[in-house]
Image (spheres, grey):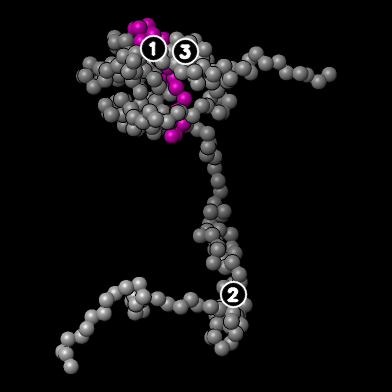
Amino acid sequence: MSAFRVQRSIGLSNISPALGSKKRQKRVGRGQASGYGGTSGRGHKGQNARAGNSKRPLSFEGGQTPLAKRFPKRGFVNQSARTWAPVNLDRIQHWIDRGLLSCSKENPITARELLLSGCVHDVHDGIKLLGAGSEHLRSPIHIVPSRASHSAIKAVEKQGGSVVCTYLNTLALRDTVHGRTDRISAAPTRKTDILWYTRWRNRGYLAPQIVQNMRGSTERLQQLSRTLLKFKTEAYETTK
């Protein structure tokens, strides 16, 4: 008899799981002989014997008033509130003097340039241009923020620059920061946003004066501007 064992070749016909790696499913409620009949291992009555007992929320405290409900509440959280990242004109001029920022009509300053240059440390829900330090502004800047104050718009245009406030939701702002241009930005849907970005006074990107004079303006922006401003010319029937 040979001292060496003959090793069988492994194939689909003779392979099996490792010993102890598989366990039979626990089947409850199949009679007393199974060991899990009757109450199915849940005991007699009580809270843990009821169906759906494992689906209690994490805040459940056995039926007593939860801790979160025992404390008084003050104020509220505005779900529509936005946090803007403020940028003053004197700061932008200082960054231009240091050579950290540059712009032109073809390549205006966006949230991406402000973040990468360190002019802002967090874009939050968008950039808001403020007019503080407007007396130090000497360069004609072209910038595309989410919001801009009227004093900032006046100071920038006085130096030969331009401001175009563009609506950016969370996804569009993320694409702007990452430099993605393969996706179409969403249009404003809230009434307050529609009114704000269609006004020439705010230099909104959907204002007719902006859309007509914007270089590279697409047919989508023109159609969007006409559609959102249609409510100003539509007449509604009144009941007598």
Asked which quadrant contains residue 105, the reply is top left
Q: Secondary structure at mark 2?
A: helix
Q: Which residues are magenta?
A: 147-172
Front label number (1 vs 2): 1
Q: Which residue is mark 3?
A: 210
Question: Which residue: 53% across, 54% down?
Answer: 68
> 148 or 36, which lies in front?
36
Residue 96 in the image: state x and y as whole percent. 25, 17
Q: Which residue is mark 1?
A: 162
Q: Is residue 14 above or below residue 90?
A: below
Screen quadrant of the C terminus = top right
Left or right of 237? Residue 25 is left
Amino acid residing under circle 2: Ala
Q: Secondary structure at mark 1?
A: strand
> 70 or 153, which lies in front?
153
Question: Which residue: 45% across, 28% down?
Answer: 184
Question: Which residue: 52% across, 27% down?
Answer: 188
The answer to whether one can see residue 15 in this image is yes
The span from disc 1 to disc 2 (Cα, nearest Å) is 71 Å
Q: Which residue is mark 2?
A: 49
Q: Secondary structure at mark 3?
A: helix
Amino acid residing under circle 1: Ser
Within 10 Å of the Cα at label 2, are there few (<14), some (14-19), or many (20+) other Cα atoms?
Answer: some
The span from disc 2 to disc 3 (Cα, nearest Å) is 68 Å
Front label number (1 vs 3): 3
The dot on residue 32 is none
